[in-house]
Amino acid sequence: MTNGNGVSRGDRNRNARLARLRELVPLENAIVGIDLADNKQMVVVTDHDSKVLARKTFRCRAWDLGVALDWVAERATANGFAGVTVSCEPTGHRWRVLGRLAADRSMPFVCVQPMQTSWARRSEDLTFDKTDDKDAILIARLTAQLRGYVPEPIDETWGRLRHLGARREQLVTDAGGQIQQIRDLLECVWPAALEVAQQPFRSKTWVAAMWVILDRDGGDFDRTRRLGAARFEHAVRREISKRGGQKPCLRILRNLYRALSDPAGVLAHRPGALERVQLLLEDWAHTQDKLADTEQRMVAVLDELKLTALVTSITGISAVGAAAILAETGDPNRFATARALVKHAGLAPREKSSGTFTGRTKLTGQGRPRLRVAAWRTVWGAQRANPVYGARYRHLTTRENNRLKPTQAQTVIAAAILRHIHAVVTTGQVWDPEIATPLRVKIFEAGWLGIH
């Protein structure tokens, strides 16, 4: 979309971003590039032409860089500058420390992506040389060129949500790894146990029965068989009651009892492998408890931010799923547009065209990987429960022109979910399916349903 002078919406957004950066990197300020490390900090003071005015190596931790910033202010004043803009790469935790020290001294602070520094390093002299002093100069040069970005402001509540989201992601990964290890072990020594239920790890009956076999009886199948089917069923019922369940699925329970006589598997490894499965089941139970506690805390933070009603107004999105997304995005208000949020996740299409040539459109793949994962996980429930997303999926996978594959269509829906979350949070309005449905999807659905 353009206006009379040919300036597009993308141009206007970019101009606004450059204006915000220029406020932090005014021409009357010297630029300080800092290459952060554990106990060695390379500090370089430059002008806007990347001319080095001073440099010094400080042998200290990040928390002790206040002395370096005071030295920088003196060097900048001595060279006729009114102030100092501090810049660094956002690696590890040290950049947060530096940002705090700069804020205490009223020094503007910007960050430069490490990828930008890597590309600039190659363009500097077409070599792969990497030293701390060179990197500090490149950070300062990129800052002068307004190639950096304004870091997310520190907020106690949003910061807590981000940390809880990181913990949840780790717990989800741990739980998935434990399930995979249990599956691998059982496929080796007792494959029949995995065949008694279509999705055994989602069955409370299967988990409780495995716990009775492996914990109560120590993996001794003969001992479990001597109980008899009735007493085995009674033991599983008691275990399910302990876990908050009501009654077992008798089909799964009886199939698992019959599987005790199945000879398939590497029998020599069976005792040790089943002991390991029992330990993994215990670890998995603890991981699930910690995961439930973390998700409860995340929802409480969402309530504190007064966003629960807004984000859950999007049909098919739970409070936990929305909290997982917002833990990775931070406050959506810091993104000027919804597309900026989608690009932050790496879900924006990458255009490739020149003259009459048009290449294949792919995703950028840049941005925050964990945000892409959180959005992707949300798609599975939202696509089925939300009629707008379901209609869009059908439209994308069945249209005549440029028909998408299922995974491509789900990626489009993931990007739509991020845009809708940005809309409801920034406007403070609940989700409206009429507004959320594109016109072409409405036309498609009318034809698909036979409505004229």
Image (cartoon, rainbow, N blue to C red):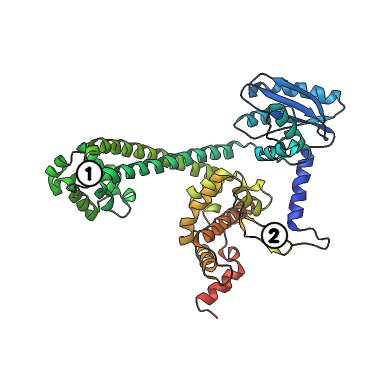
Can residue 444 be seen here? yes
Looking at the image, the residue that sits furthest to the front is 127
Q: Earlier in the sequence, mark 2 or mark 1?
A: 1
437 versus 278 height, above or below: below
Q: From the viewer's perspective, is 182 left or right of 340?
A: left
339 versus 97 height, above or below: below
Can residue 308 be seen here? no
| Circle count | 2
284 versus 105 height, above or below: below
Q: Nearer the viewer, residue 81 or 141?
A: 141
Q: Nearer the viewer, residue 195 or 268?
A: 268
Disc 2: CA contacts within 10 A as few (<14), some (14-19) or many (>=20): few
Q: Nearer the viewer, residue 250 or 6?
A: 6
On the image, the x and y values in percent for residue 174 come to 42, 39
Q: Which residue is mark 1?
A: 238
On the image, the x and y values in percent for residue 278 come to 28, 37
User: At label 1, which amino acid type do we have?
Assistant: Arg
On the image, the x and y values in percent for residue 327 come to 55, 43
Q: Nearer the viewer, residue 281 or 23?
A: 281
On the image, the x and y values in percent for residue 107 come to 75, 30
Q: Secondary structure at mark 2?
A: strand
Q: CA distance from mark 2 to mark 1?
A: 65 Å
Tag of residue 353: 2
> What residue is rendered at 34% in x and 39% in y?
285
Picture quadrant where residue 136 is located: top right
User: At label 2, which amino acid type do we have?
Assistant: Ser
Q: From the viewer's perspective, is 362 left or right of 269?
A: right
Looking at the image, the residue that sits furthest to the bottom is 452
